[in-house]
Amino acid sequence: MIVISERINGLFTSVMKAIDNRDEKFIQDLAVSQVEAGAGILDINTGPGVDNAPEIMTWLVKTVQDAVDVQLSIDTPKMDAMEAGVKAANKKVVINSTTAEAAKMGIMFPMAAEYGSDIICLTLDETGIPNDANARCEFAMIMVAQAMELGIGTERIYLDPLVLPVGAAQDQGPKVLEAMSMFKALADPPPKTVVGLSNVSNNTKERPLLNRTYLVMLMANGLDAAITDPSDRDLIAAIKASEVLLNKSLYADDFLRA
């Protein structure tokens, strides 16, 4: 399973301070530590409320690329900053993200097609997040069809069923698992799947335990990638154990170090 690090994000005070000061060493040390902890993709987010988002995104992408050689996920609601990040990257990126809104698909899918990018597709539209698995799957089908019309293969599509906080929407946990399984039947080869894992434990106690437990359940239902914190060593251990138990990696007595 692919771990997408969520830590290079201006929402974090330390990261925003480093961005404001153009502190390359801080950003690069953070990138290296996340890759060493197990991240296969680094999500790059300038954070909210910045006036010069394209310039900041370009600086972040180039700074990170000078330190590590992994795929980047460009994460911003600002289209000019998104394109700046995609252009600054020296390899294929993940565009994070589009929804099933026609206007947004009309911008994001052509961008992904032009630059050969992967793309995360959130299963919602302007009416909000669906209440059940079937509605999530309907949005997923709309986006998969639109992407494929532009030559974006399913191997480049990550479908996100949108995990909600268990403390506020407890009934949604099983519905997300059901949607995850349904997504895999949409095409052959099937699209990939991704979640923002920490959403499940927002404003709860025992956040690491809830995250780890739900991640294992998601993996059993076909999860391919999770946006999370790879520095949570117990979480990474749960991923490795799950991959062994799901027959996705070969068992060895030292599988935690493999």
Image (cartoon, grey):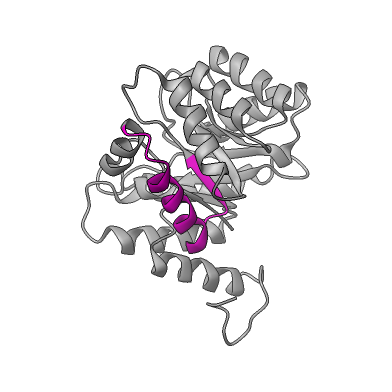
Locate the C terminus and report the quarter of the image it occupies. Answer: bottom right
Q: Could you say where residue 55 lies in the image, as x and y percent from the top left?
A: 46, 22
**Residue displayed at 68% across by 18% down:** 110
Pick the residue in front: 186 or 3.
Answer: 3
Residue 9 appears in the picture as rendered: yes
Q: Is residue 257 above or below residue 153?
A: below
| Quadrant for the N terminus in the image | bottom right
Residue 189, given in percent of the width and then of the height, sits at 77, 45
Answer left or right for 238 relative to 150. Answer: left
| Residue 194 x, y percent position in the rendering | 54, 45
Which secondary structure class fits the magenta region best? helix
Give the residue at x 28% y 46%.
Answer: 202
Residue at the extreme bottom of the image, as rendered:
253
Reply yes or no: does residue 85 show up in magenta.
no
- Residue 134 visible? The answer is no
The span shown in magenta is 21-43
